[in-house]
Every structure is written in C-alpha cells, then in structure tokens.
Image (cartoon, rainbow, N blue to C red):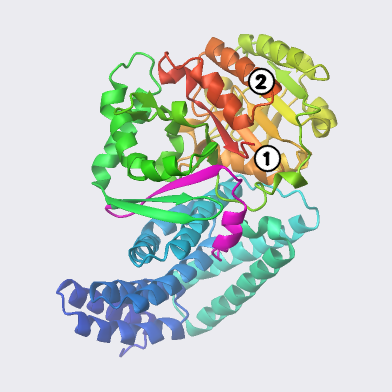
Amino acid sequence: RAVGDRSGEATTLNNIGTVYSNLRKKQEALKYYNQSLPLRRAVGDRSGEAITLGNIGALYRDTNRLTDTISYLENSVKIILEMRQGLQRQNRQKFLQDNNWSVTALIDVLIDQKQYDKAFEWVNLFTTAELADYTRLINAKVANPQVQPRLDKWNRQNQQLEALRQQLQDKFSEDLSKQVRQLEAQVYKDAERISQNFPEVAELFETTPPDIEKLKSSIPTGTVVVQPVLLNNSIAIFVLTKDRLNVVKKPIDASKFDQRLTKYLEDVQKDGNSDYIETGSSPLYDILIRPVEKEIQALSPKELSIITSGELRYLPFETLYDKQKQEFLIKKYPVNYLTRISTRSLEPQGTQKLVNQQQAVLAFGNPVPREPQHIPGAEEEVKNITQLFPTSQAYLRNNATLNNFKTYASRFPLLHLATHGCFQEEDCKKLNLKKNTLLFADTQFDIADAARLGLQGTQLLTLSACQTAQETNSSREGIVGVAYIFERAGAKAVMAGLWAVDDKATQNLMIDFYKNLKQGMSKGEALQKAKLKQIERHPYYWSPFVLIGDAR
C-alpha cells in the first residue's frame, strides 16, 4: 500500500483470504476476498478477478450458499474464456489447465443442483474450446471469403493485446492497464460482432454457452448421445436425445482411472495382448457405460453417438466389453463420434441431398509409390471400392493429384483417400511428411486450407492410411481435431484411424463398409456390420477406424 502497488495489494488480499479459507475461517476469508475483488477490477487485472471470483464461489459452495456459488463461478468462467480466446496457442493450454478447477467446480455444482441443461451447455462449450484451439494451432482458414480478412484482423489485434498484457505483467502501470482494458473491450466486441454476422465461425470465439434446446433439436431421431466428463474425483455421464437430458454422476479415483485408461490404450493397439478384456476393456465398460446402460436400453437407439474430450478421445468405445452379456459394445449398437453437438453438421436430413440414389465414390490411392510413402494395399483397396459403384472414379499413383481432387470432389458425395496424412505437432520424419498435411502425388496439402477444397456436398470423407492417435498433438485433440477441421470445411462425416493398422485388415474393412453402404445401410450401421465381420480377431484390427460426424 505504501508504495502504491494496487495490483500487488489485491493479490496479497486474495492470498490472505485463501489462507483463512484453508484454516476454515470462512467469514474472515470472505472479508479479504471482498477487499481484493474491487481492487482487481480497478487495476484491470482480469486474470486476478477471475481467480478471486472463483475463490468466493468455492467458499460459498463450502458454506452451502449454492445460488451465489453458481453466480460467482459463472462470472469467473466467463472471464477465463474471454481471456483465453485472446491468447496465442502455446499459452492457451497452460492457461486452461491453471484455471480448469473453476469450470469443473461449476459443472459439478450445477449437476448436484439438478440443473442438467445448464451443466451441459458449459460442457459443450468447453469441448468446443479444445477444438477451437486445434483449429487455431494449424491456423485453419474458413470457407467464406468475407469472413477470413475479419478473422485475420481479429487475430492481429489479439496478438497486440497479448503483448500488452505481458508488458503489464512485467511492469505494472495505471496507463498501460487502461490501454489493455480499452483494447480488450474492442477485441471482445469484435468477436461478438463476427459471431453474430457469421454464425458458422461462432465457436471459434468460444465465449457463450449454446442454447440447450437448439442443441437437442439437432440430434437425429433414434440417436442417443453419451458424453462422459471427468470432474475432480468423479465422472459425470450425460445422456441426451432429441427430447431429454439426464446425467449420472459416480465417484472415481481419478489417478487410478487415468492409469487404467493409459494401459488399455496401449493394450488395444498391440495384437499380442490377450488379457486386455480383464485389465481394461471390461472395467472401463463398468465405469463409462454400465451406470447409464439401463437408460440407453430403454431408449432403444438406432445409433449411439459419443462425445469425448481429453484422453478419452483415443478410446474406441466399441471395444468396451460387457462381461455380464459377454459382448462388445459394437455388438449392441452402431457407434459413432461427434466432435460436439453441432446445429450445423447435424441439420435435419430433409435439407441434405440424400445420396442413396446416386452413390458414387471419388477415390485416391498410393500417390507416391516409393518408400517411405509407398502403400501397396491402397491401390487394390481403391479399385475394389470404386468397382462397387458404377459412376465412381479412381486416381492412382501419379494421377492422385491435389489438382484432380479439387476438380472432381464437389461432384461426389463419398470421398476416399487411401494416402498418408501427418496430423501432429511435429513433422512425420519416418514418412517424410510435413505436420498437418495430406499426401497427394503433386504436393503435401496443408489441412489448414481444407475449407478451400469444395467439400460442401460431401457426405463422407474417408482417410484410410493416416498417422494419428498417440503421436498427435500433446493437447489430445487427436483425430477428432482433424475431423473438426474437415467438418468445418463442409464434410458431414469423416472416417479415419485412431492408429496405423495392418494393410490387409484395413482393406477388408473398407470394402465391407462400402458394400454395406451400397445395400442402403446408414454409415453407422455399415461400419458396425463391417467390424462385426472381424469381431473374433483382436480389436487392434477392427476397432481403430471410427466414424466422426453424421452417421445417417
């Protein structure tokens, strides 16, 4: 106080409040938090304001004032999201980890208060926030030429804002703080304006929870959506249909669960491991599916759609094993994945062109037939698939060019790429591929430009030989992040592998899948039946290919 360091004073008051809170002297703690909060606001310390709001929220939770708890935690989370959208990619992940507790605390309290709709709105927003990170990581473009310059300008302002925040952190001054507040207000206003004018890019700004009724109405009839969310020491499993939403919350030992999941993800990717059912597949079924099993059964779904986040994004749920019935989940239902519930990619089917009448595949295979990029099985795969549909086209070896893809893609509802892709933060050195690229005969295509591929009429994009999964970026978006990029570019669904798989098994699965499509099955059912044909084998062979997006 004596040296006039108001920012330091606010931080110290907050810290004294925390000490009192830890000593269970809640009233004393509240007194100090309430002195810190107006000071935080006066000096424009948004990050500090979010922390103090979160601390007050937690204190009200511990003293059972739950309406106040929700109000303070929501205000804290809103600031965290506003700040986070302005950070550069490398800082965003750390920022979210540091502030994650207030989000999980908020969702936890909302569930306990049976405010399931509100809880899910925040959950849906946060799963999108991770994906928006990935979109920004690779600097993905958007299809609308009017929006791109505005997004670029917004990104430049953001960078300027972050640089000023850094200066403010290094050396506080009232003038600089005022400058930061003004630019902040401008950036948030611009984000809001762009979101309103161009709804298709709204989720990139990730600040407003979406309307639950709109989300539910976009779920296809006959589909049950399941979303497990890991909270501090519990797991909440949301079950949604067009008409209802329920949540089951169970306590778990978070570190044990994490160890079990990591071990199972290793086991399922190794053919030689025979005790994977005992050690992972069955116990994980009991945690992730059993608590909501009766509810799912009662709804008799035609399709089970899973939304995942974090490490669960690498888990092929279809391999989870019900020991009581002695069968895999895939035996009970077709399983697909959603990047999030999107009112855009799941629009009512009447507004889509139905493809059964004019099914045709545009397929590309083995564009560079020499090591290390040679994929011998890809050519046979492409030939077999395209023979199934009379008006299909195949481009192999030197003809599998990006130029041919761009020329013909818009004429085909089904696009099949039996080519390498590298979807990770570093280049794929073994394959001699740059990061976040797809291999064509004439170039390595940067998937950041996916919006310019003309995928607006694409019902399904299949990536059948790409490098993803554990090697993907450290923040765990995995193949879901890649699918999100192509979804945003217009594709209704993406099929891709969670790990690189045996050539022959892939080929058989793909051919069976397309044969099933030809018979008029939905994408979800076609993939289920193709997998069941190989069900006697280790899941390593049949489970890595997952369908992400619209399964109809």
Q: Does 225 lie within the magenta span?
A: yes
Residue 48 appearing in the image:
no
Residue 492, numbered label: 1
Is 331 displayed left or right of 194 in the figure? left
Between label 1 and label 2, give the one nearer the viewer: 2
Q: Which residue appears at 33% of the width and 64% of the height?
A: 112
Q: Which residue appears at 61% of the width and 11% of the height?
A: 371
Stretch in magenta: 205-233
Q: Is residue 103 above or below residue 76?
A: above
Tag 1: amino acid: Lys
Residue 514, numbered label: 2
Q: Which residue appears at 65% of the width and 60% of the height?
A: 202
Q: Which residue appears at 36% of the width and 26% of the height?
A: 266
The residues tagged by marks 1 and 2 sit, at their Cα atoms, a distance apart of 17 Å
Q: Is residue 473 above or below residue 39?
A: above
As rendered, which of 17 and 240 lies closer to the eye? 240
Tag 2: amino acid: Tyr
